[in-house]
């Protein structure tokens, strides 16, 4: 339990106990139950001044008050003065009215349980002498930061920020309640503690017994006023409590005063009363008999219905709990309309889902509420219950055709966007477009516009273009500005994905300042989709500007789904532009928050896998990119599927699994070819070409480059054009045309630097250096100038890999660099001795082992034998005094001698030469 803030009085107390002054002091410490008074007393006892006697007395336990020492400094700690019996209190009062020099008294009490409010020593108050300093200290509830510290101490880093906020809210910041909740949560096996876990923890036993005990202390006829407070579940006026209790004015007033006197209820600001915190209310609510509880809810609904404005959400809950079905549904509809109108779509979804899940809802009302649910669900976050409800309702033959078509439209959007089952969603959208075209061209335009989005796998660009043309025609027929904006937003995404030079003009034409909230929502979606597409094209700076605008507009217009897609795109932007510090943690946090929405979490999963690949954690990379929880590439958005395949091909190449790499390359290339959007091949092409060429499919690789090049004709796609050059370099290298490969790699590196994409720039710079060294040996170009340039390139890319944190790439480039550098002069013959320091090779091997690579993977990367790697790992573990290879990476960063780190880029140790990169 945290330390209470005592700065203003503790120095005075310690001066008295240190004998620096004989003036006695009394500190009255007040705090509610569980506030930490006992903990404070224990701290004072443990930290008292040397030479001072310490005596402790707990009131109400029947023991005699200890006799104070006649002389010398004395700290008397008195617990729970509110429990003191008459004799105990009299003795304490006498001691304080005649305090001896050097006496310091700290007395704790619960203010809500004092016999006389405000008088801890009873009435009349003691006659304190002038020489006694009397101070009062109130222990305040914990802040959110203090709750965070306690949660970290108990659960490590498992608690999400939302869970911490919920802990603070539910506990009221009372330390003991916080710790009791954390004790429950500590028993959970879940990796992350969420707000839902805090809610599921229930009411701690201590708090429940305290609240129920105080309620039980009232006469049976007066307890109903406490029950009324539990039903209202929040501070309420005395008149409201009395009305809901049903006691009548006179009896209700007496019951309220009695409840306040025994601390069953507490007074908050502005003459409002309630139970001390949400959990106390929950404990009391559970104890109310069912028939009484229903009556209380009915009277609460009557009270709330007379307010202006009406709190529709609360009214809905009271009507339902009071058995008033019609009033409940009417309030739900009104509450959902208000929530959706102000952008609180998740709130609307929750209300409508709950209503539509009930069998007591009449068919006419169900047909009216279902479209409202669908409209909010389209822009909200995933809810499988919404999908289930809409799937059942849309097949109801009694529904009017237009209602069914509207529901089918929204169901299709939810399946495609939030759930990630694009094929099923596509079918629903096609049916919706057909059902709505004649009578509701506005809704038909939305369905066609969604089908025009090229992200969905399976259909070609020509099919998407046809749907876009149909959407534009239907939108014009509708005469609805919001529908025209919806189509315009998707037109922006379509054009930007293709690298259409007119795309930026379409972005500028989006009505971002429209007074219509529907138009603003669609404009926000258009901005975020354009930003995502611009990232794949390589327009990073402009993409970042669009993301900022889109996030701001989606936040203002109430579009959480759009906002989350933009947050995922921002992670991709950080990967591409080399902002890797903390990126892995940000990806994992985002995946945890969006785990049930595979389309939204796909960006973060892929980026996390790419980071793991660059850092040498190949098992983790495989899991993030294609493991159990990853989206299949058949259902993944097309650009992500292509980039993910590129990463998997590279991983297979690194592991020398050439047939698997070539198979993935052929499959992924056919999908890009079928889609027809060649700008999306930028992160696939270099690795696919290398895989084909290294398995003898040179003509297929050459054909792929030709298709890629032709597909970019007339397109503005700098990333894809950089990848074309890289692909040509990779083919030249695989065919042993080192001299041809060098300028191509250099040209590609310069193109990536201009975007910028620092990781791709470093990889192509490494390729230039690698091929230049091969050309020196194989083609007789062993000139000092060429070799010096090659070594400089390798040094540059090694430094860049190190800055990024690309452990695997750093080790590979460093090993290649060392194998071609001249050995330092004047070195004694034989292998150098490093003593207890890591040698450069041991450092490289240990770094890769700590990152998660197996001995075989390390041997492949550094062109060593597995046996040599095994020996290096063993020596590194011995020198760093760790039995675990998982700890090697951390220990290298803190314990490895700087000499070993610095020498790692130079030829100071003989090992097998490295002749090519991974």
Image (tube, rainbow, N blue to C red):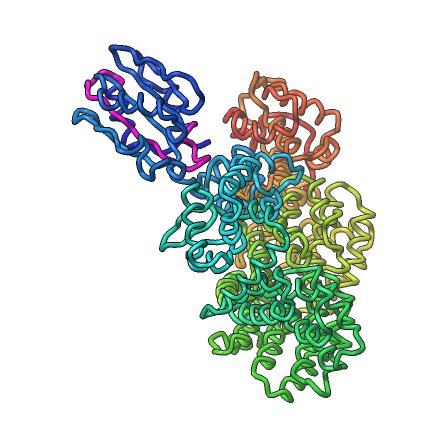
Frontmost residue, 522 versus 163:
163
Frontmost residue, 183 versus 448:
183
The quadrant where residue 109 appears: top left
Frontmost residue, 499 versus 23:
23
Q: Report x, y in % for residue 82.
A: 39, 31
Frontmost residue, 384 versus 45:
45
Q: Report x, y in % for residue 420.
A: 72, 61
- Vertically, is 361 above or below 487? above
Marker count (numbered): 0
- Vertically, is 41 above or below 556? above
Horizontal arrangement in the rendering, residue 255 relative to residue 294 (left or right): left
Q: Could you tell me if residue 350 is visible in this image?
A: no
Q: Residue at x 57, y 73 (%)?
A: 522
Q: Report x, y in % for residue 289.
A: 62, 50
The quadrant where residue 790 appears: top right
Q: Residue at x 46, y 56 (%)?
A: 241
Quarter of the image with the C terminus in it: top right
The magenta segment: 17-38
- Vertically, is 787 above or below 568? above
* Residue 37 on the magenta span: yes
Q: Could you tell me if residue 914 is visible in this image?
A: yes
Q: Residue at x 75, y 28 (%)?
A: 866
């Amino acid at each position: 339990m945290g330390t209470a803030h005592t700065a203003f009085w503790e120095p005075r107390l310690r001066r008295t106990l240190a004998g620096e002054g004989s003036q006695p002091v009394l500190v009255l410490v007040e705090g509610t139950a569980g506030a930490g008074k006992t903990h404070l007393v224990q701290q004072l006892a443990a930290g008292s001044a040397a030479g001072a006697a310490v005596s402790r007395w707990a009131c109400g336990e029947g023991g005699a008050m200890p006799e104070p020492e006649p002389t010398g400094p004395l700290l008397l700690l008195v617990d729970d003065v509110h429990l003191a019996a008459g004799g105990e209190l009299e003795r304490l009062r006498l001691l304080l009215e005649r305090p001896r020099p050097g006496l310091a008294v700290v007395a704790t009490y619960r203010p809500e349980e004092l016999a006389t409010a405000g008088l801890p020593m009873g009435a009349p108050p003691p006659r304190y002498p002038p020489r006694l300093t009397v101070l009062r200290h109130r222990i305040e509830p914990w802040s959110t930061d203090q709750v965070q510290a306690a949660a970290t101490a108990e659960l490590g880093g498992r608690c999400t920020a939302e869970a911490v906020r919920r802990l603070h809210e539910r506990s009221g910041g009372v330390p003991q309640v916080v710790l009791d909740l954390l004790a429950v949560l500590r028993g959970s096996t879940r990796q992350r503690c969420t707000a839902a876990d805090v809610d599921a923890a229930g009411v701690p036993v201590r708090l429940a017994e305290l609240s129920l005990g105080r309620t039980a202390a009232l006469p049976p006829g007066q307890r109903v006023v406490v029950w009324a407070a539990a039903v209202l579940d929040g501070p309420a006026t005395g008149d409201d409590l009395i009305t809901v209790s049903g006691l009548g004015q006179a009896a209700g007033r007496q019951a309220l005063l009695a409840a306040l006197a025994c601390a069953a209820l507490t007074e908050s600001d502005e003459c409002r009363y309630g139970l001390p915190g949400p959990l106390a209310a929950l404990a009391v609510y559970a104890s109310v008999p069912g028939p009484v509880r229903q009556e209380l809810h009915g009277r609460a609904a009557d009270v709330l219905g007379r307010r202006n404005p009406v709190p529709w959400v609360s009214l809905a809950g009271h009507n339902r709990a009071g058995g008033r079905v019609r009033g409940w549904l009417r309030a739900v509809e009104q509450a959902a309309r208000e929530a959706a109108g102000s952008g609180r779509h998740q709130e609307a979804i929750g209300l409508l889902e709950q209503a539509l899940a009930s069998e007591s809802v009449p068919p006419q009302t169900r047909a009216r509420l279902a479209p409202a649910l669908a409209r909010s669900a389209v822009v909200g976050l995933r809810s499988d219950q919404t999908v289930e409800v809409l799937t059942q309702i849309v097949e109801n033959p009694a529904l009017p055709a237009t209602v069914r078509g509207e529901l089918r439209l929204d169901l299709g959007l939810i399946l495609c966007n939030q759930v990630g089952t694009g094929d099923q969603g596509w079918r629903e959208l096609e049916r919706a477009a057909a059902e709505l075209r004649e009578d509701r061209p506005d809704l038909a335009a939305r369905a066609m516009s969604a089908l025009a989005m090229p992200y969905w796998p399976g259909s070609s660009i020509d099919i998407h273009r046809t749907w876009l043309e149909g959407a534009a025609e239907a939108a014009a027929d509708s005469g609805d500005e919001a529908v025209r904006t919806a189509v315009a937003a998707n037109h922006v995404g379509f054009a930007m994905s293709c690298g259409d030079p007119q795309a930026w003009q379409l972005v500028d034409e989006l009505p971002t300042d429209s007074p219509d909230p529907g138009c603003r929502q669609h404009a926000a979606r258009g901005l975020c989709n354009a930003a995502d597409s611009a990232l794949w094209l390589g327009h990073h700076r402009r993409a970042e500007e669009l993301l900022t605008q889109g996030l701001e507009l989606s936040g203002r217009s109430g579009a959480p789904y759009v906002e989350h897609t933009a947050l995922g795109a921002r992670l991709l932007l950080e990967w591409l532009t080399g902002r890797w510090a903390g990126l892995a943690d940000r990806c994992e946090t985002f995946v945890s928050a969006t785990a049930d929405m595979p389309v939204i979490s796909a960006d973060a999963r892929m980026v996390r896998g790419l980071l793991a690949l660059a850092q040498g954690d190949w098992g983790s990379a495989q899991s993030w990119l294609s493991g159990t929880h990853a989206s299949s590439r058949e259902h993944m958005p097309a650009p992500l599927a292509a980039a993910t395949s590129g990463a998997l091909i590279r991983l297979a190449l690194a592991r020398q699994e050439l047939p698997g790499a070539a198979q993935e390359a052929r499959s992924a290339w056919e999908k890009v070819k079928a889609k027809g959007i060649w700008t999306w091949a930028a992160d696939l092409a270099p690795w696919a070409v290398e895989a084909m060429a290294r398995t003898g499919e040179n003509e297929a690789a050459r054909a792929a480059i030709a298709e890629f090049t032709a597909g970019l004709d007339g397109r503005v796609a700098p990333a894809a054009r950089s990848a074309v050059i890289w692909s040509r370099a990779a083919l030249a290298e695989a065919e042993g045309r080192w001299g041809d490969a060098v300028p191509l790699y250099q040209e590609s590196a310069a193109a990536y630097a201009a975007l910028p994409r620092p990781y791709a720039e470093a990889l192509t710079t490494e390729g230039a250096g690698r091929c230049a060294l091969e050309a020196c040996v194989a083609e007789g170009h062993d000139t000092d100038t060429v070799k010096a340039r090659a070594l400089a390139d390798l040094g540059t890319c090694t430094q860049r890999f190190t800055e990024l944190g690309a452990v695997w790439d750093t080790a590979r480039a460093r090993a290649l660099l060392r194998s071609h550098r001249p050995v330092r002069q004047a070195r004694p013959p034989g292998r150098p001795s490093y003593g207890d320091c890591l040698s450069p090779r041991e450092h490289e091997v240990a770094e890769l082992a700590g990152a998660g690579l197996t001995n075989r993977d390390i041997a492949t990367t550094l062109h060593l034998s597995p046996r040599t790697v095994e020996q290096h790992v063993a020596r590194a573990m011995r020198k760093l005094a760790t039995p675990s290879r998982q700890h090697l990476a951390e220990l290298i960063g803190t314990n490895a001698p700087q000499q070993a780190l610095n020498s790692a880029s130079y030829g100071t140790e003989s090992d097998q030469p490295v002749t090519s990169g991974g």
